[in-house]
Image (tube, coloured by chain):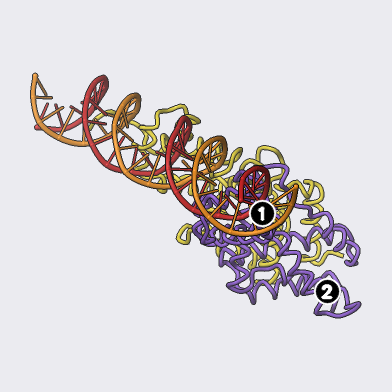
Chain colours: A purple, B yellow, C red, D orange
Amino acid sequence: MPRKVDHTERRTLIADALTRLAATQGLEAVSLRHVAAEAGVSAGMVQHYFRTKDEMMAFALEVVRDRNQARVAAAVATLGDDPPPRLLLRAMITAVLPLDDASRDVGRVALAFLAYTAVRPGLRAETAQLLEYFAEVLPGGATAATGLLALMEGLGIYLLGGQFTAEQAIEALDAQLDVLFSVR
Amino acid sequence: MPRKVDHTERRTLIADALTRLAATQGLEAVSLRHVAAEAGVSAGMVQHYFRTKDEMMAFALEVVRDRNQARVAAAVATLGDDPPPRLLLRAMITAVLPLDDASRDVGRVALAFLAYTAVRPGLRAETAQLLEYFAEVLPGGATAATGLLALMEGLGIYLLGGQFTAEQAIEALDAQLDVLFSVR
DNA sequence: CGTTTGGCAATACGACTGCACTGTATCTGC
DNA sequence: GCAGATACAGTGCAGTCGTATTGCCAAACG
């Protein structure tokens, strides 16, 4: 066997370059050569690790999703054991929302991929899991969960567009949580 | 003056072809030649009416927005004079949501443009108007309006992705309206 | 040692891109 | 009828695209 190289490490390195590109210029600017240049490697190397562009896109999409999931998990972890449901939900949602500049980049990438998968069935995300969890925890059940999930997504969109400020978004989120948990 | 041709008519004809393309294959599939073929005209003609591709994109974006606004206006018009606020809001929101296959296409295009404008400042949409109106009508004021707008957007996204059915979305919307208007 | 094999670079290729340019037909105003 | 403006169609060009192919280099194995 020849030289040993961590395959997944290289792949994520390339995927990171792709997301950086997508965050600033959109997925339309993503090409093998651009990604290679952004990653500081040769175009041939990108091809070595991804036989086709589609494969590269799919992998990058996976990475983005994993990262987001990890962010949520990390936010949840800081809450300690058995936190009150409301705090838990709030932490999970604020972890996903693009509230600062850094996460705004992530959000832009997520949005780009959202439009990307919209015309490419077979890459769709699984929301069922999160939805079920919301439904379990919320007094309002499935309908409340649907609404909260949609609210989250919508807040993200408008935050990205700059139509809502972080304060407005959080205020709206808290107001909704107030209602759902019937605080008065 | 030479031959008389309705300029805007041709331009919207081309823009329609563009949106048709965007609905099925995404904005990445939009090129001068593709659009021309879809519209059944020569590539030269497209260039005649749009000096650059950016100009064509911007115009198509405008058309999509106008169409959406018209849909809302039409939905409102069917309600007659001075309808109850709750019904009005419901009509406006359901007019925008991609609830059937036809409006799903529109939704996909809107999503594509959303991602498109996310990396192209200067093409951003104006939501302030709708937000203000919501805030006026809703008992909850600005915060309630923010939440409702976000809910609307999020429902649209998940409807497009197929994660929510039309029934689920409407149920969530009605539940939210119930809460906002304090029906008990 | 040589052979094999994976890591990687470079090049070539055909298709496609946006755009500039040219040519031609058609119509209006003088 | 002629000059000029508009409405196209067609072609050419420089650049980029994704992908296949080739070749060199280093490391592991027999």
In the picture, measured across the screen, residue A48 lies left or right of residue A184, that is left
User: SS for tag 2?
Assistant: helix
Q: Quadrant of residue A98?
A: bottom right
In the picture, measured across the screen, residue D30 lies left or right of residue C6, that is right
Q: Label 1 lies in what chain?
A: A
Instruction: Identify which residue is drawn at 85% across, 63% down.
Output: A134
Instruction: Identify which residue is drawn at 62% across, 64% down.
Output: A106
x, y percent for residue A116: 62, 48
The residue indicated by pointer 2 is: A88
x, y percent for residue A87: 82, 77
Checking the image for residue A109, the label placed there is none
Q: Residues within 10 Å of mark 1 (few under 14, many from 20)?
A: few
* Residue type, numbered disc 2: Leu
In the image, B65 versus A38, the foreground residue is A38
Instruction: Identify which residue is drawn at 57% across, 66% down.
Output: A163
The residue indicated by pointer 1 is: A2
